[in-house]
Image (cartoon, rainbow, N blue to C red):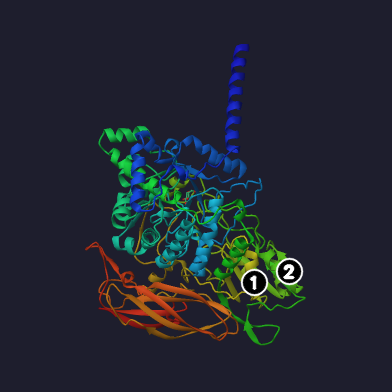
Amino acid sequence: MKKSIKIIGYILFAIVVFAVFILYRIYDYQLEPIAFDKTKFAAVDSDEKLDNLARDLVKQMSLDEKIEQLYGRPMSDALIFVGNSAIFDRATAMFAGGNERLNIPAYAFSDGPRGVRANKERSSGDKLGVTSFPVSMARGASWDIGLESQIYDVIGKEMRASGINYTGTPTINLLRHPAWGRAQEVYSEDPWLMGEFGLAAVNALQHHNVMSCAKHFALNSIENSRFVVDVDVDERTLREVYLPHFKKVVQEGQVASLMSSYNKVLGEYASNNRYLLTDILRDEWGFKGFVSSDWFFGTYDGIASIQAGLNVEMPYQKVYQVDTIKQGIVDGEITEADIDKLVFDTLRTQLKFGLAQDPMAYPDSIIATADSIELTRIAAEKSMVLLKNSKVKNGHSKNRPVLPFAKDSNKTVAVIGRLADMENLGDTGSSKTTEPYVVTPFEGIRDYNKKLGNKVILDNASDLITSKALAEKADQVIIVVGYTHVEEGEFLLASEEANKAAKQGKRTGPKTNGGDRETLKLNPEDEALIKALAKTNDNLVVVYVGGSAIDLSSWDSEAPAILFSWYSGMEGGNALANILYGDVNPSGKLPFSIAKQESDYPYFTPYTEQITYGYYHGYTLFDKENIEPAYPFGFGLSYSNYGYSNLTIQTPELTSSDTLKVTVTVTNNGKVAGEEVVQLYLGFDNSTVDRPVKLLRDFDKFHLNVGESKTVNLTVDAKDMAWYNPEAKAWEIEKMIYQVYVGASSAKQDLLISEFTII
Ligand code: BGC
């Protein structure tokens, strides 16, 4: 008896020691060094030298050492990641690669669509967070590529200062349907807009020698069934709609890496998909970087992944097991040369960035500086979209738009809604950030009104009668509605449960976090609030917080003004106040179409094992089927109004290797300065094949003072007019007359039209 108690005691003691050891390892999480010791390597000033160096290093590795390069870290390290997140709310960097014997350091991964995900503590022990920007969809609505470059310049620097040189951003999957849970992480429904933003992100990150990993390759536009869904797509749709933005970051951005998606494409998981990872990506596009898998649940079969061309399994070793790989070589399914090739791609990329000269140093002090925080506010201001701004009678007795609100003093301002005072920056999955502070809508409006001498009352809308009474007596009313990470975002419910549900074609029970939206309508409480208050006060604006399109049909006509403010980052509340009171003139435009009713969009379900992505969605679908949207792609109001004139085709006849050149004059006819986004679409009325009515092919955003006119130059390379002929397996440029539409949105009435010929 005594003996067995003693044994139990020893066992318990051992368990406690082990637990303490593990806890300590979790607590004592350290960044691995990622800098190359450049004294150990000859300078690599040409592609050839780089290739030779990488080849030489691979040659020096044993098979076991090479296999080690094929996955992040051993599965046992998962405890460090999970433990840090669960116990210390700390997002750790994830490491891969490295070989001490050959002086190769590891590389360190963090996500980052709206800022650095991995929250390193500063060397001072100070836990101040990183700069948190408005979500990507908001930035897409800014239509400002220069701004995106500035944003990723900051994110790139903060990555490096955080010990990161490999990042899972930008996310460039297409918004096929607005209910997609991760809509906020991407830029648009349109491949062109997506590609231009993706390219800006990649260039800015890679300028700081951060290897960008664009994701998720490919067709990852449903969230809840992402682990099981098989996306069927025809060849033209794949090439013309779902891949162009990936091709752009590969060919024009020389992106270091891509992340394979969780889903299947044409019957094969993306990580096993040779057609995607080798035939298209490497053989056709000439990709020279490396592909890593999406995390934990993204790999299925080590041999198939090697055959397909998946370079690195992230973040842990699951299917790239030493025994499996060696057996595969013995069985002749793969060769050691296949492994060499995969390691070569990764190592070559790592060396290219790791041995390059850094443009600057990256001390902790560059994280969340006053300048970068100011940039988040500017980004939020430039991305907010004013959808509606009715003319109302107000105190000044003449008709004027609701916004901007008058800057009177001694007034009462009511800020109403569940989300009015919530720190609500969007997804809390992989795109989450830890920031020093967040300015909520209420805080921004309150602080703004302090200087005017107004009283700002917050009401969280728990009782409609109280809210209504408040709205009636207030001078200005701001209703804040929309979503949080609970209604949309990365789906974080146990994946097994989600998979099972997807297979049965149903949802998983009460939602815990994120996922696709079940409906495009706002929550019933929000709709009830808008309806109860909309008519109580002329000076009332509905501010929507979220990352995608909504169905606003049941309250649109009642709301005097509507502003899409998105998940607007840590300075969002200040930006909102600046827009509402006219310190900043709104200039955002919708990066997607808003339908009048949900049934106008293509078929979508969060719970399915199979779906077909068709050639048309978004504005191309609405154009083709003559469906009038509630608010068209590219639409957004301003406090000013801009006139378009003199659309001139500078190159009326082109060959298929030329560039179309167009000019148009834009004039600010309003009473305030502002920024306008001009859009150019090409039309294909004369095509002999089925083509969209029009496609976005260029845009520009610029500032105009009151009365100022500007002649804007727009261009389209003839290669970007091509369609993919699946029979010829080639891109073809039709020799015909094309339409050119230039204007303020994708709606017919906003566009000037002209034409040119490809001869
Ligand atoms: C997401 C990726 C992300 C990865 C690492 C996955 O669940 O799909 O977008 O990069 O986690 O956080």
- Residue 592 seen anywhere in this rendered image of the structure: yes
The furthest residue to the left: 728
Residue 168 x/y as whole percent: 47, 52
Query: Residue at 36% of width from left, 63% of height from top?
Result: 244
Residue 232 image offset from top left, x and y in percent: 33, 56
* Label 1: element kind: helix
Residue 414 shown left or right of residue 216 in the figure: right
Callout 2: SS = strand
Q: Quadrant of residue 461?
A: bottom right
Percent coordinates x, y for residue 138 in the rendering = 53, 65
Q: Amino acid at mark 1?
A: Asn
Of residues 556 and 437, which is closer to you in this image? 437
- Distance of mark 1 from mark 2, alpha carbons? 15 Å
In the rendered image, which residue does mark 2 sit on?
456
Residue in front for this viewpoint, 22 or 546: 22
In the rendered view, does 597 fall on the left or right side of 568? left
Question: Vertically, is 13 above or below 282?
Answer: above
- Numbered label attached to residue 383: none
Rendered location of residue 219, percent (x, y): 38, 56
Disc 1: residue Cβ within 8 A of ligand 1's nearest atom: no
- Residue wearing tag 1: 578
Viewer-nearest residue: 6 or 200 = 200
Does ligand 1 reach within 8 Å of label 2's beta carbon? no
The residue shown at (70%, 85%) is 396
Mark 2 is on which residue type? Val
Badge 1: residue crowd in 10 Å (few <14, some 14–19, many ≥20) = many
User: Upstream in the sequence, badge 1 or badge 2?
Assistant: 2
Whether the residues at callouts 1 and 2 have beta carbons within 8 Å, the answer is no
Quarter of the image for residue 339 reads top left
Name the quadrant of the C terminus.
bottom left
Q: Quadrant of the N terminus?
A: top right
* Residue at image coords 32%, 41%: 340
